[in-house]
Image (cartoon, helix red, strand yellow):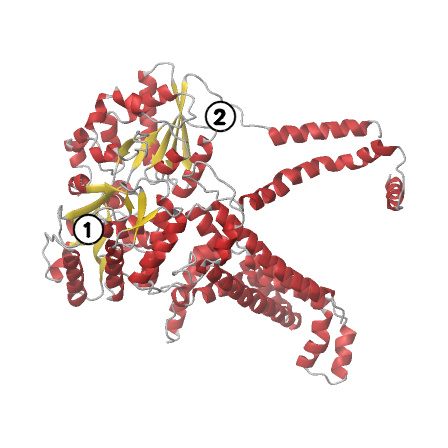
Amino acid sequence: MTSAVARAAARARRPGARHAGGPRTLLLRWSPLVPATVLLLLFLVGPIGYCVLIAFTDTQLTGQESASFVGLANFRHAFGDPAFRNAVVLTLVFTVLSSLVGQNTLGLALAGLMRRASRPVRALTGAMVITAWVLPEIVAGFLLYTFFERRGTLNALLDQLHLPAQNWLFTLPIVAVSFANVWRGTAFSMLIYSAALAGIPQEVTESAEVDGAGGLRRLWHITLPMIRRSIGTNLMLNTLQTLSVFGLIWVMTRGGPGNRSQTLPVFMYDQAFLKSLIGYGTAVALLLLLVGALFSVVYLRLLREEV
Amino acid sequence: MRPTAPLMLLAATVVAAGTLTACGSGSGSDTGTVKVAFIKDTNGKVTVRDDYVRLVARQFEKEHPGKKVRLIPIQASENDYYTKIQQMMRSPRTAPDVVYEDTFLVNSDITAGLLRPLDLYLRTWDDWRQFQPAAKAAAKGQDGRTYGVPDGTDTRGLWFNKKIFKKAGLPADWRPRTWDEVLDAARTVQRKVPGVIPLNVFTGKGAGEAAVMQGFEMLLYGTGEHQLYDPGAKKWVTGTRGFRDSLTFLDTVYKERLGPDVSDALSPNIQTNVAAELLPEEKLAIDLDGSWLGQQWQKTGGGNPWPEWSATLGQAPFPTQHGAPPGKVSLAGGWTWSVPRKAQQPDLAWKLIETFQSKPNALEWCVRGAQIAVRKDVAADPRYRTSVPGIGFFTGLVGVSRYRPALPEYPRVAAAIGEAMEAVTADDASPDKAAADYDTTLKSLVGGRTVAKP
């Protein structure tokens, strides 16, 4: 059976190869894929196509007799909309703060430290960090809301230490939700980097040590270049995850106060479901997709470059 | 192996096609069954409405032998409930025969062609004369036809704590005549009773429609006529003085720290905080809020019994801006029983609505659900008048109550009002700037159908 498949594959790879048995064999060969393809078309490609389609209409959730095509009006409206520009800036701040700087660096640091730690410490730290990660987003949101709230845990702690109280959910909401996202998402980076660091051969590190390289130099010249691919992969996954964070922000601040923590997903929800402008909301969703694509392209280039 | 491949394929395709096109069967139109869809509280312990609907359904089955009522309780938050019934009503296969509609959205659904006009039935229904004129308009479409029968309503006014008022030297029969008198009372409390919040006015996006209706519109509707929408011109109104004045009032409350801490005021939990903590713990002197507030403190209310509430709290109507007649403002909301356009059993559905809104059943619902009666004969009934303390006062406000603009765009406009309130409360914008931003947003929300009325 397997050899038959291999033979068939080899035949198919030869340019201009004629399929023995003609179209019927071809049909048979592809037929097992039909159900899966149908499912994909129905449940994946269909909705995405539909989304792209309604981004060019003035569709509304309710209160409208019929929708019509409006061309690029939604996109023009977005670029002229100060609330949209504000959302783009906040999305970038949120992504850079919590994903690039926060989760990524902290994850690497934790992974590095845990390699040297004793077994119980490693187990305990790992368990704690991973617990934060496996919590459902909505639960994490409520937990962190009660932590940062004006009468919440953080202020109770600060009060014990005789430090001034904070009210970040109100004064620096985007920082508060970024912290929350770091708290929740660091485990993922930590796991990726733990695996990557474990893959660095001991001899390389040891010989560098013998040559008298200090910790920082070893990190910069040996560790980082050797786990470059993991860094790229991790950044890409992290960024895409962070770009689409909605529940955490919604529970903690609802994008407020004012619109000081209204990132693109929250803005999208507000337009599509609170203001019923499904068409406009979908157009914004497509623009968010574009932002994600831009980030991905940059990371892919990082991955491709040879040192 | 080979010959069976096409067979396997065929089988797989059949199975897939079967699964993919399987439709919900069993909801066909059974001539003797009437389906009624209504919202069930997200808190499973609260079964006030379920119990009442079941009671009426049993009575209906007794009165119409051979007919059955199928209950479709939908346990969801209000927004999700709206979405769900809108989807159900789109197809004759899933449309209920009777649906419970919030007046907040009923006009959206009328415009979308989801509901059936009831005028033919109402013409032959004697009880319709018992309904208050304002209530009759609750589900009136822009075509002048009526699409629903309201089962109750709610009104809004000032609740104040008499004990705190005594400490502040304010009267127990407080009756402010202008906005300034409300603010002055709050300032007096601030001076003489430190540690309590003088005045709560809901504001911002977190509280949602509670802020827009209990907060902003209670102010706006006391500044003059047609401040949001001009029915004559059929256009939404921009640039009014009343809009700016209402925002200025809010600005004063939060700038002078007469209200809750701004971050609390803008939190989505403020409504729960007010009803479950601030009022029962006597940390709030004056609260601009709804008629239903007392139901939670009753023994039957579940959450937080507070036996002394009726002795501790007084009520006063909310005044117009400068005391212009009628001197008091209230807004009314509520829900209606409607029939979807695609209902299979419209006649039977109407019979069920008649049963729901017969006098004894309407009375039963008002008592159980702490509702304000919309039928004059229920409002006069002694059992209703003694059901919840304060119900008499709030029923008295029905006469001056106004409804929100009953238009499909209203929910969107309300979201924009919430944003303007939030900007002022959080000190992100002056009242004038927030009002100007609202005007810009409004134009894009209603497709430019606006008229400036400075």
- The mark total stands at 2
Tell me, yes or no, whether dots 1 and 2 are on the same chain.
Answer: yes
Count residues near mark 1 (Cα–Cα under 10 Å), then give few for <14, some for 14-19, many for 20+.
many
* Helix, strand or loop under label 1: strand
Above/below status of A200 relative to B390: below
Task: Kindly identify the residue that appears in the image at 40 percent across and 39 percent down.
Answer: A63
Residue at point 76%, 78% (across, down): A206
Mark 1: which amino acid?
Leu
- Expressed as whole percent of the image width and height from the top left, the position of residue B117 reads 34, 27
Say what secondary structure mark 2 lies in. Answer: loop
**Neighbour tally class for label 2: few under 14, some 14-19, many 20 plus, Cα within 10 Å:** some
Residue at the spot x=13%, y=62% of the render?
A: B168
Q: Is residue B22 above or below residue A230?
A: above
Q: Position of residue A55 (x, y in %)?
A: 53, 47
The answer to whether B196 appears left or right of B64 in the picture is left
Name the one closer to the observer, B107 or A156. B107
Residue B93: give its label. 2
Task: Please state the chain letter of the residue tagged with numbered disc 1 in the rendered image.
Answer: B
Q: Position of residue B138 (x, y in %)?
A: 28, 35
Relative to B375, B355 lies left or right = right
Q: Using the numbered discs, state the Cα–Cα distance from disc 1 to disc 2 in whole angstroms.
A: 47 Å
Quadrant location of residue A50?
Answer: top right
Residue at the bottom extreme?
A212
Of the numbered discs in the image, which one, if any, rests on residue B158? 1
